[in-house]
Image (tube, rainbow, N blue to C red):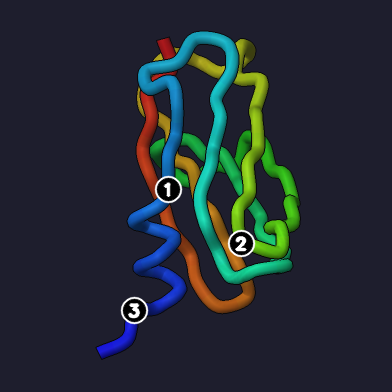
Amino acid sequence: MSVTNKEIMQGSLTIFPNPARSALTVKAISPPNKELTIEIKTIFGQSLQSQTVQSDSQGHFMARFDISNLNSGSHIVDIKTDETKVSRVFVKH
């Protein structure tokens, strides 16, 4: 059985710090040289911020978000490629 791109991204996804106050970093591994959209949403799905990033030749990517203006509470980070989507919850203090 082979490992899927979604499983690789889920297993490598790191969001820190969590909980966060002013900045949030998102790191993971995806297919190499792939365009990804990273989106921060409310727990109800309303989009708050979005970035498009490109993974490097090894598949690594990182994005940093200024979350100082977000309301306190739980939020969702969605990472999407044209093939898959991975989501995680983080807490804003």
* Pick the front one: 79 or 48: 79
Q: Position of residue 42 (x, y in %)?
A: 47, 35
Q: Position of residue 21 (x, y in %)?
A: 49, 9
Judged left or right of residue 78, residue 58 is: right
The residue pinned by badge 3 equals 3
Residue at the spot 48% in from the left edge and 42% down from the top edge:
77
Rendered image quadrant of residue 75? top left
Q: Residues within 10 Å of mark 1 (few under 14, many from 20)?
A: some
The residue pinned by badge 2 equals 59
The residue pinned by badge 1 equals 13
In primary-sequence order, the first of circles 2 and 1 is: 1
- Furthest residue toward left: 1
Task: State how far apart marks 2 and 3 are (Cα).
Answer: 15 Å
The kind of residue on which mark 3 rests is Val
Q: Is residue 34 above or below residue 93?
A: below
Residue at the spot 63% in from the left edge and 41% down from the top edge:
62
Q: Quadrant of the C terminus?
A: top left
The kind of residue on which mark 2 rests is Gly
Q: Position of residue 26 (x, y in %)?
A: 54, 38
